[in-house]
Amino acid sequence: VEAFGLSPLEAMVAGVPVIADQRFADVFHGVAFYVDPGGVADHALRLAREPAHYEEVVSNASRFAQSRFSGTAHVARMQAIADISFG
């Protein structure tokens, strides 16, 4: 995964659950699973065995990605910075 984590964001928007390293917790908050490499299989199996849980995870992650990283969200952040900077 690259430094910013674009691949996990793309996965979230596409409806794919993200199982990531703990270092991404500050970026993706509670919408990804953070595990050591040895814990990936357990989380993947749970998602496969529990369709309702899978759908909840996918839905939450997609909403998060859209609200934080969409073009609209980016424009709003840039406007807020411009408002602060140029008042």
Image (cartoon, rainbow, N blue to C red):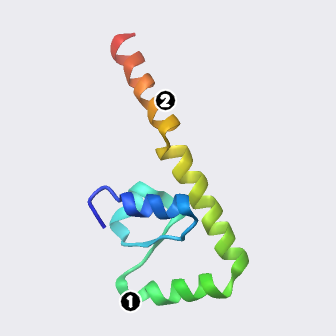
Q: Residue at x 52, y 35 (%)?
A: 72
Reading the image, the residue beneath label 2 is 76
Residue sitting farthest toward the right: 52
Q: Amino acid at mark 2?
A: Ala
Residue sitting farthest toward the front: 14
Place residue 35 in its image quadrant.
bottom left
Disc 2 to disc 1: CB gap under 8 Å: no
Coordinates of residue 8 in the picture (x, y in percent):
43, 63
Label 1's element?
helix
Q: Residue at x 35, y 11 (%)?
A: 86
Coordinates of residue 15 in the picture (x, y in percent):
58, 65
Coordinates of residue 5 in the picture (x, y in percent):
35, 59
Q: State the residue in front, 53 or 2.
A: 2
Q: State the residue in front, 37 or 51.
A: 51
Q: Amino acid at mark 1?
A: Gly
Instruction: Report whether residue 30 is seen.
Output: no
Q: Is the residue 60 above or below the residue 81 in the image?
A: below
Instruction: Report whether residue 80 is seen.
Output: yes
Label annotation for residue 38? 1
Q: State the residue in front, 14 or 83.
A: 14
- Mark 2 nearby-residue class (10 Å; few <14, some 14–19, many ≥20): few
Q: Residue at x 49, y 29 (%)?
A: 76
Give me the C-alpha separation between circle 2 and circle 1: 39 Å
- Mark 1 nearby-residue class (10 Å; few <14, some 14–19, many ≥20): few
Q: Residue at x 42, y 16 (%)?
A: 83
Q: Mark 2 or 1, which is nearer the eye?
A: 2
